[in-house]
Image (cartoon, grey):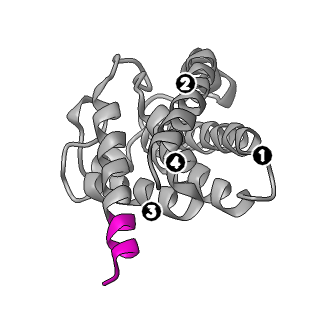
Amino acid sequence: MNVKKIRDLIFVALMAVLIALCSWLSVPAAVPFTMQTFAVFCALLLLGGKRGTLAVLLYLLLGAAGLPVFSGFGAGLGVLFGPTGGYLLGFLLCALLYWLGEGKIRDVVLLIAGNLFCYLFGTLWFVSVYSSGEKAIGFGAALMLCVVPYLVPDAIKLLLAFILTRRVKKAMTL
């Protein structure tokens, strides 16, 4: 294996760890407030679409395998297939969208679109899983519960990710 491939694997693993660490910075809510989106944005901005997507995928696989990498130290397929699992899987969709548009569309536009896609997918998932139980919730109510409170914090995380990654890129060769 050549040095570049080893370096790529290390960076992907480090970004997966960063996403996990940021998931533990959590404020409990229907959908917990975490710093995961910040770490996903950083992974994509620092590593690019392909390696950033691999970092998100690795993070999800670690959690699916039972390592406590999700918010509240959650782990397992139960979390991924639970009410908030759509938002976790939405991170992967955000990363894939970024990868698809990389070099063709501005980074900020891709990340905003990816985050909106994550909101949409996660909310549809939330409504589906939550409504399969004894209680039902409408899409509008789910948006108010699961998306609206996160709009401003996620915008701030995106801004912070841009500022931080620009500085880190100047200091390192990625």
Measure the C-alpha gap from mark 3 to mark 2: 22 Å
Read off the magenta span: 1-9
| Residue 154 drawn at (x, y percent) | 57, 24
Q: Residue at x 31, y 61 (%)?
A: 10
Which three-letter amino acid code belongs to the residue tagged 1? Arg
Query: Label 3 neighbourhood size at 10 Å, few (<14), some (14-19), many (20+)?
Result: many
Query: Residue 119 or 166: which is nearer the viewer?
Result: 166
Q: Which residue is mark 2?
A: 160
Going by the numbered disc 2, the residue's amino acid type is Leu
Residue extending farthest to the right is 104
Q: How many neighbours does mark 2 have within 10 angstroms: few (below 14), some (14-19), or many (20 or more)?
A: some
Q: Residue 31 in the image: state x and y as whole percent.
A: 44, 26
The disc placed on residue 46 is 4
Front in this rendered view, residue 42 or 78 = 42
The residue depicted at 63 percent of the width and 23 percent of the height is 155
- Alpha carbon separation for disc pair 4 and 3: 13 Å
Helix, strand or loop status at disc 3: helix
Residue 117 sits above or below residue 101 on the image? above
Amino acid type indicated by mark 4: Leu
Q: Secondary structure at mark 2?
A: helix
Q: In the visual, does 115 lie left or right of 51? A: right
Query: Quadrant location of the N terminus?
Result: bottom left
Q: Which residue, given by chain and number where applicable, does mark 1 sit on? A: 106
Q: Residues within 10 Å of mark 1 (few under 14, many from 20)?
A: few
Kind of element beneath mark 1:
loop
Q: Which residue is mark 3?
A: 54
Q: Earlier in the sequence, mark 4 or mark 3?
A: 4
Mark 1 or 3, closer to the camera: 1
Measure the alpha-carbon separation of dots 4 and 2.
13 Å
